[in-house]
Image (cartoon, helix red, strand yellow):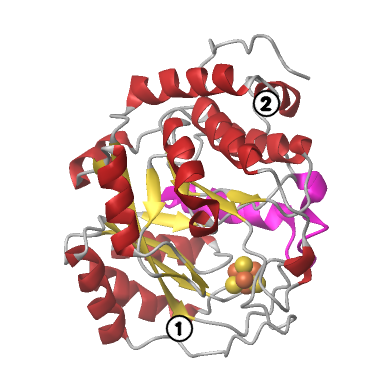
Amino acid sequence: MTTTHASPTWTPERIETLLALPLPELMWQAQQTHRAHFDPTEVQLSSLLSIKTGGCPEDCGYCPQSAHHEAGVKADKLMDPDLVLANAQAAKDAGASRFCMGAAWREPKDRDIDKVAAIVEGVKAMGLETCMTLGMLNAQQAQRLADAGLDYYNHNLDTSPEFYGNIITTRTYQERLDTLQVVREAGMHVCCGGIVGMGESRRDRAGLLAQLAGLDPYPESVPINSLVRVAGTPLEQAPDLDPFEFVRTVAAARITMPKAWVRLSAGRKELGDGIQALCFLAGANSIFYGDTLLVTGNADVDADRALFTRLGLHAASDGAATQAAQPQAAPAQTRIPIQPAA
Ligand code: SF4
């Protein structure tokens, strides 16, 4: 049975009410929250590299790396460590402050942990923050990675507990929560978010945010992905979602997790400059930066630089990232949504 983490402050019902506010009201609340904790012109840049691509035994319906789907992604072995380090240096030179590495595993084997721990040490030595997403971890593996200096571990909840079974059948929600728990206990920061646009309802988006905000403490880093409909995956034909629903989700993430880095992740390129700008106004303050996001395209670096210039945004310094990565449980006193639209 899944142990739900919905906080007493941010219930799914309350977040659903928040999501339904008139957009100007929702944005105003999100902006006030954002400005209370961050410089609203500052955006943290993370770069993501797939260090082990394809052939994953899990069946996540959105993912081209799943061996269950026919998306044409070739299964590779773990990348040569020197190549990983060369990519990390290039990301740093391009302005990234955090280097995220992803491996398409259900869970790493202990011998894999030794290899990736050495990679973490090498990337840390460059002065970059490090993040990994390797699938489920046990407590010993989490501690080994923490001891190697891994700053963040990414493990997404993806969607609400109620909708989850429509998307993934090979890993339970509870297994995800268990991995997040051992990551916390090992002393690492948590990066955890979800995906919008998989055919879920607004209530499901509220349910996801309630789970995230209910983690104690809530994640330091919250990636909000917009589904990229990849040919050959079960979600290839997922219905269109009004992009303002994505903006609303970002705003509600900001309000419910005030000190988190709220990151625009997969699907950012497809959102276009206008919706991205609205997301920054709604409190998004981190992006994945670089040409590829695991195996789907990302907004290219030149386009990002041009957008930042047009919007007057700038990259967050390392110090800002470290300083802000100290979330607390949701405050007892929070703004009551007013004038719900529905
Ligand atoms: S999302 Fe991760 S766990 Fe799921 S199929 Fe893709 S690589 Fe595997």
Lower position in the chain sequence, tag 2 or tag 1:
2
Which residue is tagged 2? 15
Inspect this view and state whether residue 130 appears. Answer: no
Please determine whether, in this image, residue 12 is positioned above or below residue 292. Answer: above
Q: Is residue 74 left or right of residue 98?
A: right
Quarter that holds the C terminus: top right
Q: Residue at x 47, y 49 (%)?
A: 264
For the residue with label 1, is its CB less than 8 Å from the closest atom of ligand 1? no
Residue ID at (31%, 39%): 311
- Magenta-highlighted residues: 161-190
Q: Quadrant of residue 168?
A: bottom right
Disc 2 on helix, strand or loop? helix
- In which quarter of the view is residue 213 placed? top right
Marks 2 and 1, how far apart at CA: 42 Å
Callout 1 amino acid: Arg
- Badge 1 local density, few (<14 within 10 Å), some, or many (20+)? few
Out of 39 and 27, give the one closest to the viewer: 27
x and y percentages locating residue 289 in the rendered image:
35, 60
Q: Which structural element holds mark 1?
A: helix
Q: How crowded is the residue under tag 2: few (<14 C-alpha within 10 Å), some, or many (20+)?
A: many
Residue 251 position, x and y percent, is: 54, 31
Q: Tell me what residue is drawn at x 39 percent, y 86 percent.
A: 79
On the image, numbered disc 1 is attached to which residue? 111
Does residue 65 belong to the magenta stretch? no
Q: Which mark is residue 323?
A: none
**Residue positioned 35% across, 22% down in the render:** 35
Which percent across, then down, holds residue 209?
63, 36
With 263 as the anchor, is 89 left or right in this view? left
Residue 28, how many percent across, how many down? 49, 18
